[in-house]
Amino acid sequence: MSKKNLLLLGIFVVLVIFLPGFSKLQKLKEKNRLLNSEIEKLSEENQELAHQVERLETDPFYIEKKARDKMGIGKRGEVRYRIIYESEEKDAKDKDSNR
């Protein structure tokens, strides 16, 4: 065999041996990048939830606001408006027609 053929064979063998590993390494790096991004997003969400918990434990006005919003009631003399979007209106009509 000539030196050129041996060199080509050597390059081919190296590619066959290392290319699958390199490909897997690239996929793992991409997966790692996506997971780090998700971790960052979840950390931000966790901080926001911790802030809400702190406010619920210490701020009586925040507790009152959250309770009134959840229960749909207002203070004396306060006028509350409810905006009904077309999709909600359609859902309500569908529920009424199924009864």
Image (spheres, grey):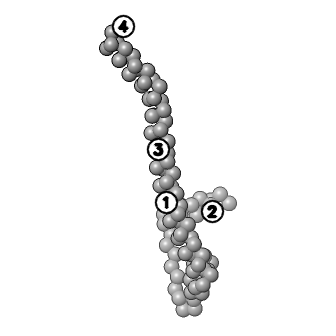
Q: Residues within 10 Å of mark 1 (few under 14, many from 20)?
A: few
Question: What residue lies at 33% left-to-right and 9% top-to-bottom?
Answer: 2
Q: Between disc 3 and disc 2, whose residue precedes?
A: 3
Q: Position of residue 64 (x, y in %)?
A: 60, 84
Lower sequence index among marks 1 and 3: 3
Image coords of residue 84 (percent x, y): 50, 69
Q: Residues within 10 Å of mark 2 (few under 14, many from 20)?
A: few
Query: Residue 29: which disc?
Result: 3
Q: Is residue 71 above or below residue 94?
A: below
Question: Of the residues under marks 4 and 1, which one precedes in the sequence?
Answer: 4
Q: Is residue 25 left or right of residue 11?
A: right
Point out which mark residue 1 bears: 4
Query: Is disc 1 in contact with disc 2, using a CB cutoff of under 8 Å?
Result: no
**CB of mark 3 within 8 Å of CB of mark 4?**
no
Residue 48 image offset from top left, x and y in percent: 53, 70
- Residue at (57%, 80%) from the top-left corner? 55
Q: Secondary structure beneath disc 2?
A: helix
Amino acid on which the number 2 mark rests in the picture: Asp
Alpha carbons under labels 1 and 3: distance apart: 16 Å
